Image (cartoon, rainbow, N blue to C red):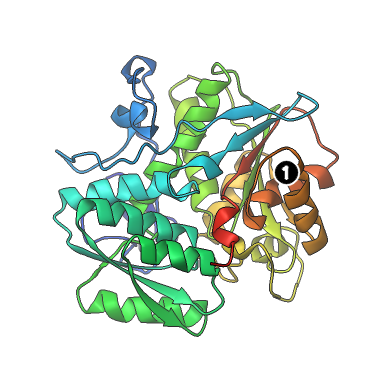
Amino acid sequence: MELICDSCGKRWEMEPNFWRCACGAPLRWDLKVYFDLAAIEERNWSIWRYRAMLKLPENAQTVSLGEGATPLIPTPEKQSWLKLEFLNPTGSFKDRGASVLVTGLKAWGISEVAEDSSGNAGVALSAYAKVSGIDCRIFVPKGASEGKIVALQRFGAQIVFCSNRQEAAEQVMIAVQSGIYYASHTWHPLYLQGTKTVAYELAEQLDWIIDENWSVFIPVGNGDLLLGIHLGFQELVFSKVIKRLPRLIGVQALACAPIYAAVHNLTLPFNRTVAEGVAVTDPPRIRQIIAAVRETDGDIVAVSEPSILNAVDELAGLGFWVEPTGAISWAAWNQLGKPPKSILILTGAGWKTLKP
Ligand SMILES: [Zn+2]
């Protein structure tokens, strides 16, 4: 039994039609993966170099667009690092989750999927579904970036417009009840098997020398990236490849910061933010996110709208066109005085925020 419910404690095996516990709470992976350095496929320059360490259905055929193996480059003062996740095939780290999830869905014979997403997760899913011959329906809240909607159209997704995120979440559930598979980046356990490869890559790119003196700055909305990175580093510690977990610094936009508010015992209003990818008012995995951050002696940081726009400009000054959501890790690093031994995850590309 490799999946655990944090709410009721019940354990489950991974099964096709199974994206949450029977009690309704999200599931997390038990620590059972042994990271074997000798099992890395050295000539494979994608997340699939770690295939032996990914939990997948039996006989799954890889669905890959070359995701992962993104550059890790030094910051201008050379004491910290930028992880260029916006260079993934559809322009965000979500390709890692979508690649593993769709690989699993294909093995299970799924032919039609639905997802509620305002952007990158929907675009990634639609691309991997397209290449797999799986029909894809995305429920999109009004106000999503036009560039992301154009990308969804490009990959042939059926787009259902909803008045807001809440309605999108309700509408997707109606579709799921009618028999369409829920390929959720927020809920599906396989998604974290993809995003955990960020931790593997960071450790390998730093010659397996990463520990509690390092901080990883991660934009957090639903937490699928932070929880994946946490899982990956946990497995590396469990397997004695690294000695200790680095500190995880979850970053939110102050205008929509429920996790920051919960960690720091604050009551904050929700407003619109330019960091649309992390504008989540009620993340289902909030308990897991807070537990992960605390376990690493990390923190949740919130950044203002002007500081986000400033971060986008500063990154452009380095030649990187990153979307506002992807720039908040830089904004938080600035806010904390640019501590050395930091890794900033630049999650999404700027081009999708363009108007068509
Ligand atoms: Zn449960």
- Asked which secondary structure carries label 1, the reply is helix
Q: Position of residue 255 (x, y in %)?
A: 73, 68
User: Furthest residue to the front?
Assistant: 356
Q: Quadrant of residue 59?
A: top left
Give me the residue at 38% from left, 24% from top.
35
Asked whether the viewer can see residue 25, the reply is no
Q: Is residue 224 above or below residue 261?
A: above
Nearer the observer, 103 or 90: 90
Is residue 28 visible from the viewing direction of this image? Answer: yes
Side (left or right) of 117 relative to 98: right
Looking at the picture, does residue 174 appear above or below residue 71?
A: below
Q: Position of residue 170 (x, y in %)?
A: 40, 81
Q: Is mark 1 within 8 Å of ligand 1?
A: no
Which residue matches tag 1? Answer: 315
Task: Say which amino acid is labelled 1.
Answer: Leu
Q: Is residue 119 left or right of residue 251?
A: left
Residue 125 against residue 159 in the figure, above or below: above
Residue 334 is left or right of residue 38, and the answer is right
Q: Position of residue 43 (x, y in %)?
A: 34, 18
Q: Quadrant of residue 304?
A: bottom right
Please state the horizontal and vertical placement of residue 5, each as a whole percent of the image. 39, 56
Quadrant where the N terminus lies? top left
Mark 1 is surrounded, within 10 Å at the Cα level, by few (under 14), some (14 to 19) or many (20 or more) other residues, namely some
What residue is rendered at 59% in x and 62% in y?
354
Furthest-bottom residue in this view: 163
Total numbered labels? 1
Q: Residue furthest right?
A: 337
Residue 50 sits in which quadrant? top left
Q: Residue at x 46, y 30 (%)?
A: 69
